[in-house]
Image: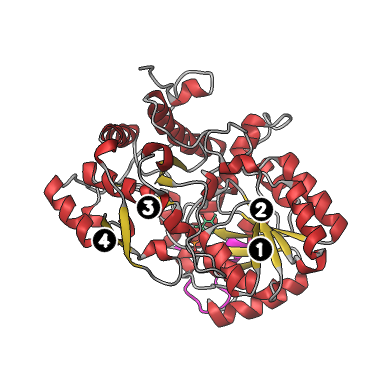
């Protein structure tokens, strides 16, 4: 058993620690096995249906679970709760303009609110929207607007052991083939995501987005960026792409955005707030349309579903999120957990991505067929073992094909351990790793699940299961 490298050693120097200290704590405790068994049964083997009180270490998601800084909390007290023209909106607008470089900003209550507006404004029935692997809410909003999502990510992204450093890249040949087949006029935009969540948090290279822009310019196709985890993507560019090693995260982020026509954001991720989102574009006419749509679905164009205080915390969160030390500590913690699991030969998606460790349930439970939800069961077993909450990213998340009504069978069947930003310590990561090891050691005694309740949309959130 090799000792994993400390965070500092990964960067070839002496160990260093998180660039913050803890000022306020929230007690957590591990319950006993019997209590957890009861809770899991009541939750229908779906970790989304557990009560947070029954969870010990919560790695369900990094969405809205970040710890805010003292400066952000101070910003909360500066909330200007005017219905229209709150000063906090202008601070938010300025932060997005400064760090992401887009001219026009529309606030939304969270990421899917922004996806809804962009999809409604640009997609018509019969349109195709190519993207680097789907994201659940993104694809659904594209489909609800009448579009068809087409995955044009590199093949490597679907292979959990392929070590390509930029597995999030768009395969330009696949995109060209789609353009040839359906015509550029039927492609309203390319839906490009930074550190692709469903692929394991895999980054996109600067070279790829530059080449993508060239191709899209030739055909008059726009590029919109899912910027949810674009800051983390910038770290991978800084570390792995020639010419960027001396550039700041902020500079890399801004250059990357400069190749796109706009972006939408779930501010609950990179931007270090518990709720919020935004949509930003360069095109004044599109902005006009979006600003009109936002009042129907979210709220006035100067709050979009957020309180003034939320917008202030978000504006401050944006500036903190691009600090190099912050991003390095954040991704460093993910890599620390990944290093432990790798040293114990536990199958995870490699290379380790930006926000989470993805356990490869197909290799973890090779004896459980995919339609018996191995990744769902793995999440349940982890919870039963230690109260650690993770989530499924496999066949349940992939849903059904709208045409045939059959399950989609994704090549990746994963259980995600998502690390909240600035929340847990290295000791928490040790406890998580040891629990994964215990579940791995008991893998052959574990069997699959059957789905006994299935909601129509985004079924993974509310579906219920029973052991087969
Ligand atoms: C979370 C997420 C969204 C949706 O954002 P919400 O704030 O949850 O509505 C969109 N895209 C990606 C990549 C995400 O991770």
* Quarter of the figure with the C terminus: bottom left
| Residue 100: image tag | 2
- From the image, state whether disc 4 or disc 2 is nearer to you: 4
- From the image, state whether disc 3 or disc 2 is nearer to you: 3
Res 87 visible: no
* Quarter of the figure with the N terminus: top left
Asked if the residue at tag 4 contacts the one at tag 3, i.e. Cβ–Cβ closer than 8 Å, the answer is no
Label 3 beta carbon less than 8 Å to ligand 1: no
Alpha carbon separation for disc pair 4 and 1: 39 Å
Asked if the residue at tag 2 contacts the one at tag 4, i.e. Cβ–Cβ closer than 8 Å, the answer is no
* The magenta segment: 78-93
Q: Which residue is tagged 1?
A: 280
| Residue 373: image tag | 3
Q: Taking 379 as reference, is 11 above or below it?
A: above
Alpha carbon separation for disc pair 3 and 4: 13 Å
Asked if the residue at tag 2 contacts the one at tag 3, i.e. Cβ–Cβ closer than 8 Å, the answer is no
């Amino acid at each position: 058993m090799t000792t994993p490298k400390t965070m500092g050693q990964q960067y070839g120097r002496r160990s260093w620690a998180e660039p913050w200290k803890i000022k306020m704590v929230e007690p957590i405790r591990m319950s006993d096995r019997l209590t957890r068994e009861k809770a899991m049964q009541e939750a229908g083997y779906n970790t989304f249906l557990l009560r947070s009180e029954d969870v010990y270490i919560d790695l369900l998601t990094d969405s809205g679970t970040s710890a805010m800084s003292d400066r952000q909390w101070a910003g909360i007290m500066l909330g200007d709760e005017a219905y229209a023209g709150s000063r906090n909106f202008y601070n938010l607008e300025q932060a997005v303009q400064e760090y992401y470089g887009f001219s026009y900003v529309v606030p939304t209550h969270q990421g899917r609110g922004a996806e809804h507006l962009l999809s409604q404004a640009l997609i018509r029935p019969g349109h195709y929207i190519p993207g680097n692997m789907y994201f659940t809410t993104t694809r659904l909003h594209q489909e609800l607007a009448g579009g068809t999502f087409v995955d044009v990510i590199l093949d490597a992204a679907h292979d959990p052991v392929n070590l390509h450093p930029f597995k999030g890249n768009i395969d330009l040949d696949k995109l060209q083939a789609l353009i040839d087949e359906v015509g550029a006029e039927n492609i309203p935009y390319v839906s490009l995501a930074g550190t692709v969540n469903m692929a394991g948090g895999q980054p996109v290279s600067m070279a790829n987005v530059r080449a993508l822009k060239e191709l899209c310019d030739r055909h008059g196709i726009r590029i919109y960026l899912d910027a949810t985890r674009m800051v983390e993507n910038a770290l991978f560019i800084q570390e792995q792409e020639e010419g960027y090693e001396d550039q700041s995260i902020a500079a890399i982020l801004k250059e990357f955005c400069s190749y796109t026509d706009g972006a939408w954001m779930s501010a609950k991720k990179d931007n270090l707030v518990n709720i919020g989102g935004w949509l930003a574009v360069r095109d004044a006419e599109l902005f006009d349309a979006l600003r009109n749509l936002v009042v129907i679905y979210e709220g006035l164009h100067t709050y979009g579903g957020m309180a003034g205080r939320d917008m202030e915390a978000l504006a401050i969160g944006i500036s903190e999120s691009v600090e190099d030390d912050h991003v390095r500590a954040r991704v460093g913690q993910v890599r620390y957990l990944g290093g432990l699991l790798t040293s114990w030969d536990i199958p995870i998606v490699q290379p380790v991505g930006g926000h989470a460790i993805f356990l490869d349930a197909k290799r973890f439970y090779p004896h459980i067929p995919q339609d018996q939800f191995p990744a769902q069961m793995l999440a349940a077993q982890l919870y039963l073992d230690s109260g650690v909450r993770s989530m499924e990213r496999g066949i349940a998340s992939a849903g059904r094909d709208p045409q045939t009504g059959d399950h989609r069978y994704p090549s990746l069947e994963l259980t995600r351990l998502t690390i909240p930003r600035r929340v847990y310590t290295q000791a928490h990561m040790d406890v998580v790793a040891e629990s994964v090891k215990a579940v791995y050691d008991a893998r052959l005694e574990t069997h699959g699940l059957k789905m006994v309740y299935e909601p129509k949309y985004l079924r993974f959130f509310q579906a219920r299961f029973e052991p087969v």
